[in-house]
Image (cartoon, helix red, strand yellow):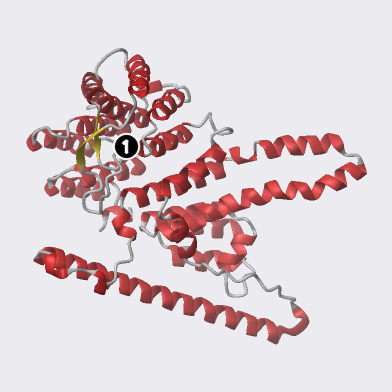
Amino acid sequence: MDLADRYINTKATKYLLRADKIEQAESVVSLFTKHEGDSRSNLFEMQCMWYEIETGNAFLRLGDIPRSLKYFMGVDKHFDDFIEDQFDFHAYCLRKVTLRSYVVLLHMEDRIRGHEYYSLACHGAVVCYLRVHDMPALFKEDKDEDLDFSKMTAAEKKKAKTKARKAILKKQKEEEEAKQREAEKKEALEKAKKEGGKRRTRKLEVDKDPDGKIAFDEVKGKPLEAAWKLLEKLQPIAADRIQTHLDTFDIAVRMKKYALCISALKKGATCVASGIDHPEIHWRLVALMNSVENEKLFFAPWASVSTNSDDVCSFVNVKMDVSPVVLKAVKDIGSQLLGNKPASVVAEEYLNKYKNSSSSLRKLSGAKAWIMIRASAPENENEKIFSTLVDTEKDNQETKLESSVKILAFIRSFCPNASIVDKFISDCRVKYPLAAVFQE
């Protein structure tokens, strides 16, 4: 690679991050940063948002929620700075009487959060917050002395000890990385001193929370409130994007705001040509209306039932906590969207319509909706849905890597038969020989 080519450097960094090779990406991008030993601080100072979004997504895929949130919220901080910076021009524009340009600037500031980068960062942060809500056990800092091994089975003891050991190793690795960063900074500063007057260096502000733990600890006890606060900034100016309404639904259903849920799905359907047939809208609408018809919640995260990494996608049977007035309103609007058909009928029609389709996402949506409303069905009956999905995807030449990754996440979460999961991974290894996600 030509080390002096900024375009190639940027592309290489982007694709290294998408392959989750974060350290390698940092070393590549640092060739074009004046970082005095800390390329991250320099990229944040330059407001390099594409890098922060890609890095946040990489950490999210690796399960490092605190660091992922740090990068996503860094983008939010940039937009706060953009809005605050407009006041620097206020007195100048009045004094120089450049009012027309200043009014244009004010209008631009009113809709600046509608930028695609802000939407992407908000979505990433919302996913992080939802994961904290759905899997709180993963983020508890349990110490060995707090664990009561006397009440555990042999398997539970083994699992607890393994978790504690991993936590210790992770902490040691983080300490080593911190020492390495400090050594790099020191080396760069010494080099700058030797250069003398050749290059004047500017000392960057020290990041007091490099791993995002301090900021994460402030919000991990109330993730839904933090997610909602962030989304409120986006809703007024990104109402034309379906992802805004999907995120609204995902937060609202966990907060038990069902009127807001059905409203979000209705608005989301107007953002796309396919309407309620859109894959991401279909399974949410069917699952919600199935709960409304039965006045019960069946999906553990929607019921805000504390889960752990093993049963995050488990099913429950919890009575809906909703007033009769709201319930009737949601039923009326939902029935209208479903063409006055029961949720189970709509789910079956959608599943049969797209089970042999070349659209992987529609097949996935149909299977997900069916599984979520048929949680209590016999295990072998649900297995047919997973088997059909995997078999039809094997020879689907129009499927994309992103769709296959989503299907893998779905069957890993819901399919009890490990052989079906293994078969899908084997098929994908042939189809995507370079994709790291299928090489594990």
Q: Position of residue 167 (x, y in %)?
A: 31, 70
Front residue of 361 and 140: 140
Q: Is residue 120 left or right of residue 430?
A: right
Q: Is residue 99 left or right of residue 126?
A: right
Identify the residue at image location x=27%, y=53%.
Answer: 438
Identify the residue at image location x=15%, y=68%.
Answer: 158
Quarter of the rendering containing residue 184: bottom right
| Vertical placement of residue 439 versus 372, above or below | below
| Vertical placement of residue 40 versus 286, above or below | below
Q: Position of residue 10 (x, y in %)?
A: 55, 57
Front residue of 378 and 380: 378
Q: Which residue in the protein does label 1 denote?
A: 399
Q: Amino acid at mark 1?
A: Thr
Q: Is residue 169 left or right of residue 264?
A: left
Q: Position of residue 196 (x, y in %)?
A: 74, 84
Q: Which residue is situated farthest in the bottom direction here?
A: 194
Q: Is residue 244 left or right of residue 236?
A: left
Identify the residue at image location x=40%, y=36%.
Answer: 252
Q: Position of residue 359 (x, y in %)?
A: 31, 30
Quarter of the rendering containing residue 386: top left
Would residue 2 be visible to someone looking at this image?
no
| Vertical placement of residue 147 versus 119, above or below | below
Would residue 171 be visible to someone looking at this image?
yes
Badge 1 marks a residue whose secondary structure is loop
| Vertical placement of residue 308 versus 202, above or below | above
Q: Residues within 10 Å of mark 1 (few under 14, many from 20)?
A: some
Identify the residue at image location x=42%, y=78%.
Answer: 176
